Structure formats: C-alpha cells, structure tokens
Amino acid sequence: MPRLRIGILTGGGDVPGLNSVIKEVTYRAPKTIARFTVSAAAGRGLTHVNLDDPASKENYIRPLSRENTRTIDRFGGTVLHSSRTNHRRCASCPVSLRRRFPEERRDMGHEQTGDRQSLQAETRLPDRDRRRRHAELRREARQTRRQGHRHPEDHGQRRPQHEYCIGFSTAITRATAAIGDSAAPIGSHERIGIFRVFGRDAGYTALYTAYVTAIRCCIPEFTVNLEKLIDPAAY
Amino acid sequence: VGGYTVQEYGDPDAFGHRRKASVGEALSIEIRARTGEESIVSDLTYDLRSGEADFVDKMIATTFGNIAMDACFDGKSGLMAALVNGCYTLVEIPDPKLGPRRVDIETMYNTDRYRPNYGKKFGLPIFLTHA
C-alpha cells in the first residue's frame, strides 16, 4: 500500500462526535499518524508550530496511536481544543508556511503578542470574522460573475449535498435536557424561560430543539414581530 | 414592529467594534418593559458544543470515520462522508461559497405561531430534510 498522509480537517470549532472520528481513523490507519494539537488557547497548532524546532513540534504535534485514542470517544468535548477564527487575522504568517510564501504575502493582519489583552481580543474574533468572511464570499461571487465565470450556485449546487453534521443530535439532546431541567424553577417562580442556542446564520438547532420540546423559537431566517412574539395571548 | 436589532455596549475595541448584548437578555428586557413579566435567560451555546456525544452522534461519527478511511484506501479524494436520503455515502466537499444551509421557512417553520411545522413529514428522511 502506498504511504498515506491523512489530515482531519474540522469545519469551525470542534463538535461532539469528532473524537469518535479521530479514534476510528487512527484505528483503521496501518501505522501511527500525527495530528496538530494545541498547548494553550484557541487552536494555535497549525499557525504556531515550527517544524524545524523540536521543542515547538513537541508542543504542538501529538502522535496518534491506538493507545492514546482508545478512550477518547468516551469523553465530552473533543481533544483538539481548536476554535474557529479568520486565518487572515491570526499570526503574521504561520511559521510552517514561511518558506512557501514570499515576504510580501505574509501579512495576515495583526501580530499576536500572546498577552492577556490580545487573548481577550481573540475571543471576540469569531463572530466578526464569520460576518466578514461571508461578506468576502459574497464579494467573490459578484466578481466571479462579473468576470463572466459561473459561480457554484449557477451550477445548481445551491446547498450542501448532505443532511447531517455530527454533533447536531448531541446539541439537541443537551438543549432538550437543559430546558427540561429548567421547567420546574421557571414554572414555580412564574417566569418566562428564554433559551439561547447557537445558530447565527441558520436556525436548525433552535428549530429542532423547539420541535422536540414544543416551545416557540426565533430563527435567523425569519424576522419575527416582537409584539406578537411577546403577546401572551398568542401562545 | 418587525425584527429587533441587538444592542451594543462598552467601549469600541481597536477595530471600532463594540460588544453585542446577548439576544436572550435583550428579549428579556423587552418583555419586562412591555409586559412587566420577569424571565429567566439561559445561554446554552457552549454547553451544546461541549457535551459527550450521544448515541446518534457516536454511531454516525464512527461510521463517517470508517467510510472516510475506506475512501482513502480506495484512492479516492476530495470527498466527504455524508448522509443523503438517510443513507451513508460519499459526496463532494461543499463549496464554502455556498454559505450555510438555511431552514426552509415554507415547509419547516410556522410563521404565524413561531413554532416548527409538524405536518406533512411523510416520506422524509429521519432528520426531516432532503439533501
């Protein structure tokens, strides 16, 4: 069998179930494989590792084996500890890529100092980054069409050709459990329960949670009328 | 009044952006202002991401991992494991230019009652959407 180099690309942050994927890939691989990991905050393995520095490799790369992945599927969360952010605004240029890119193409935004203030700023990046990325994608689509080329939407691929993302069931299960646990205190205190779930761009999590808990939901695809939403007579 | 713009607070950061208030807290304030009712707000966002995978996710994730490895061994690339019409398969990696897939309001959301639509699900895959 030819030598395989396998990477596990996670779209955005980690999800419940990803540990199971990592374990299965490791178990099916003929020999030990390696992956990037993090030492401290917010997914810095890929952007901070220096492959020429043994200490850096030790810090950011962890070999995967049957032994160290045997039980990872039993635990919540994931072992990657990565977090979504805008690659254009992380480090000035990932150390591992500096040999591939000329100096003038290395500017990726701002310098990371690693101090507390910078770390706090990073924690606020994802939402902004996502909006900016969407704006960039829309701009690119317009440019593509202006240049006479067809955009992927023009080829009929108007949405992803799949119907499930791992972690979705766990999210709904946990939301349902949390809402159920809150029912007694909310009821006994005669309060209105408001639950915020993720889904800035798509309301599937809110919709399916509402589906199984029989509650109302607001989703980003539809602008609700606030008066009507709050009106108790509308329940 | 249609819609609501989430309020911002605090000083702008180095990029001129102020922090956004929680939409749950904002709704709670609006409810109290308009009706006098008190509410309890729970932010579940990170709790949903960090939990131990349930049965469905463990089963599907385990199968996805094995399907991906089977594809590697068969020399295939540029594909990802997926569920289509309720069946495991390999599909092309979606173009990120497509953005997120949106809820189909017409079939899935009751715009009068702000609740999911429960009817007309016959023939749909288990997760109620077609690829």
Image (tube, grey):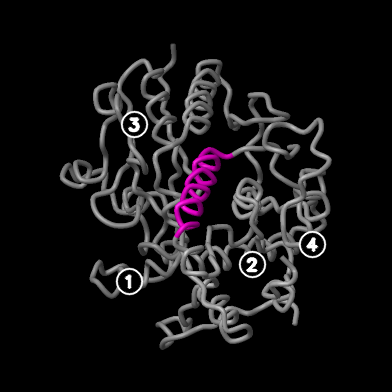
Using the image as rendered, state which of residue A217 and residue A66 is in the foreground. Answer: A217
The answer to the question of whether label 1 and label 3 lie on touching residues, with beta carbons closer than 8 A, is no
Question: Is residue A44 something that shows in the picture?
Answer: yes
Q: Nearer the viewer, mark 4 or mark 2?
A: 4
Residue where numbered disc 3 is placed:
A74
Whether labels 1 and 3 share one chain: yes
Find numbered disc 2 in the image and state the secondary structure of the residue it sits on: helix
The residue beneath circle 1 is A120
Residue at x 47%, y 57% (from the top left corner): A184
Both labels 2 and 3 in a single chain: yes
Say whether residue A183 is magenta: yes
Work out whether A29 lies above or below A81: above
Q: CA distance from mark 2 to mark 3?
A: 39 Å
Compared across the picture, whether B118 is left or right of A76 comes to right
On the image, which quarter does residue A233 sit in? Answer: bottom right
Residue lying farthest to the front in this orientation: A188
> Which of the chains bears the disc numbered 1?
A
Residue to which mark 4 is pinned: B111
Q: Which residues are magenta?
A: A165-184
Of mark 1 and mark 2, the one earlier in the sequence is 1
**Residue A135 - label:** 2
Residue at 75% x, 37% y: name it.
B130
Height in image: A133 above or below B30?
Answer: above
> Between tags 1 and 2, which lies in front?
1
**Image quadrant in which you'd find residue A74:** top left
